[in-house]
Image: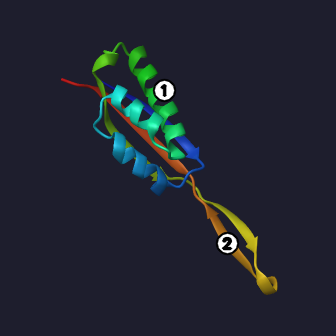
Amino acid sequence: MEATAKVTFVRIAPRKVKVVLDLIRNKDTAKAMAILKHTPKAACEVLEKLLKSAMANAEYKDMDTTRLYVAECYVSQGPTLKRIRPRAQGRAFRINKKTSHITLVLREAE
């Protein structure tokens, strides 16, 4: 059995989230939560909330919460918000504000 949690349209670039996801992949939930609490990255706040949600989903499915680990975690790019920055001599530069869709899957260790 597995428990899944997703969060979409997070205003963090996917490459910044991927760095933190690589830290918690294949770790048990207690260790992953400790890593997220003590890592000074902006994505950790969102991922901590997502991990709590996945753990709650696992508890709802009557899974053993002490044996859970992060089996899969991945991020894909969402829609990009395009903004304009005024520049010299009447020109305009585009600023791309990227969004992320993050998925977290928990499974029971055997």
Q: Compare residues 37 and 8 and report the one nearer the observer.
A: 37
Residue at horizontal 43 percent and vertical 40 percent from the top: 103
**Residue at mark 2:** 94
Residue at horizontal 67 percent and vertical 64 percent from the top: 82
Determine the residue located farthest toward the bottom in the rendered image. 89
Tell me residue 95's x, y (percent): 65, 67
Q: Earlier in the sequence, mark 1 or mark 2?
A: 1
Position of residue 14 relative to residue 61, above or below, is below
Q: How many marks?
A: 2
**Kind of residue at badge 2:** Arg
Label disc, if present, on residue 6 of the rendered structure: none
Gap in angstroms between the C-alphas marked 1 and 2: 36 Å
Q: Compare residues 74 and 42 and report the one nearer the observer.
A: 42
Tell me residue 73's x, y (percent): 37, 41
**Residue at mark 1:** 53
Position of residue 93 relative to residue 108, above or below, is below
Query: Residue 72 is drawn in which quadrant?
Result: top left
Task: Indicate the colouring scheme.
Answer: rainbow
Mark 2 Cα shell of 10 Å, populated few (<14), some (14-19), many (≥20): few
Position of residue 36 relative to residue 57, above or below, is below
Residue at horizontal 51 percent and vertical 45 percent from the top: 43
Query: Residue 59 is drawn in which quadrant?
Result: top left
Residue 5 lies left or right of residue 96; in this view the side is left
Tell me residue 41's x, y (percent): 50, 47
Tell me residue 12's x, y (percent): 56, 51
Q: Quadrant of the C terminus?
A: top left
**Kind of residue at badge 1:** Ser
